[in-house]
Amino acid sequence: MPTFFQSKDSLPPELLARWDRAVSEYDRVLREVCGDSETKDLFFYNAIREKSALFWRLLNGKEPLLMPPPTSYSYPWYEIIEEPGPHQVGDIGFRAYGKPLGGELAALRGMDHEDHLFINQCGWTVLSHNAAAQEMLDALQSGDFTLADQNRLMAAGPEWIVQYREWPAYRLFVQRYRRQTLPRFLDDTLRLVDKASWTWTNTVVIGEREDGGVELESDGWFLENRF
């Protein structure tokens, strides 16, 4: 869990000069978020400012967004809204998508089946997906697949169109990327069958690094606003 600053006394003068305004704006935003909910009020107002991405943003002279952004591992994901991307994502919950919902939850949602993908532990609504994504989903839900199946299905270019609340729709797609590992993990990495996110498929060795590591290239998931 990140800590953006240690204490008020530790802040440099340029940030300390914004303290009062940041406190006022932070409280205003939280009041809008909490409304009349005592549960939300208890949760949000007990948040520690030193660990608040919103408060850190205000201290740095930025304005709050018009509505809360998606989260990434429980923290506001401002970059996905404000930077062009594409943005790499590493944790996608595919397995629940498309499965039947229980009676009470279905009544609340107004639908019979789960329509969310959980990207970095945040729920995004699925608007559509292509045939390659459907084939991948079928394999995931059957649970009967090998590393060769993963490599083949990811290479086919699965894509999903997803949306978080009222923000614009995003394209979730596969792209090659570079990463590193240590020699002792290389064999296991190349044999990995990822049962959840399929983030390290079609991995090839690029070469050795001067620091003793091994550089790899793999397929991974990325989000991009194309709309």
Image: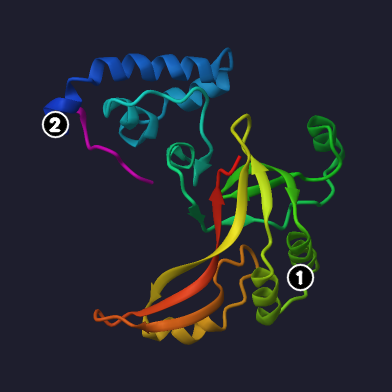
Q: Which mark is residue 143?
A: 1
**What's the CA distance linking mark 2 and mark 1?**
53 Å
Q: Give the range drawn in magenta.
A: 1-8
Q: Where is residue 191 in the image (x, y as percent from the top left)?
A: 57, 83
Which residue corresponds to the image point at 75% horizontal and 47% vertical from the top-left?
128
Residue 183 appears left or right of 219: left
* Secondary structure state at the residue bearing disc 2: loop
Look at the magenta stretch and give its main secondary structure.
loop
**Amino acid, disc 2:** Pro
Q: Is residue 101 above or below residue 139?
A: above
Image quadrant assignment for residue 37: top right
Q: Position of residue 56 (x, y in %)?
A: 31, 31
Which residue corresponds to the image point at 43% horizontal and 22% vertical from the top-left?
45
Q: Where is residue 98 in the image (x, y as percent from the top left)?
A: 80, 51
- Depth check, front residue: 178 or 43: 178
Q: Residue 43 carries which label?
A: none
Q: What residue would you read off at disc 2?
A: 12
For residue 120, say whether it is visible. Answer: no
Reply yes or no: does residue 2 show up in magenta.
yes
Crowd rating for badge 2 (residues with CA inside 10 Å; few <14, some 14–19, many 20+): few
Which residue corresponds to the image point at 86% horizontal and 41% vertical from the top-left?
112
- Depth check, front residue: 224 or 63: 224
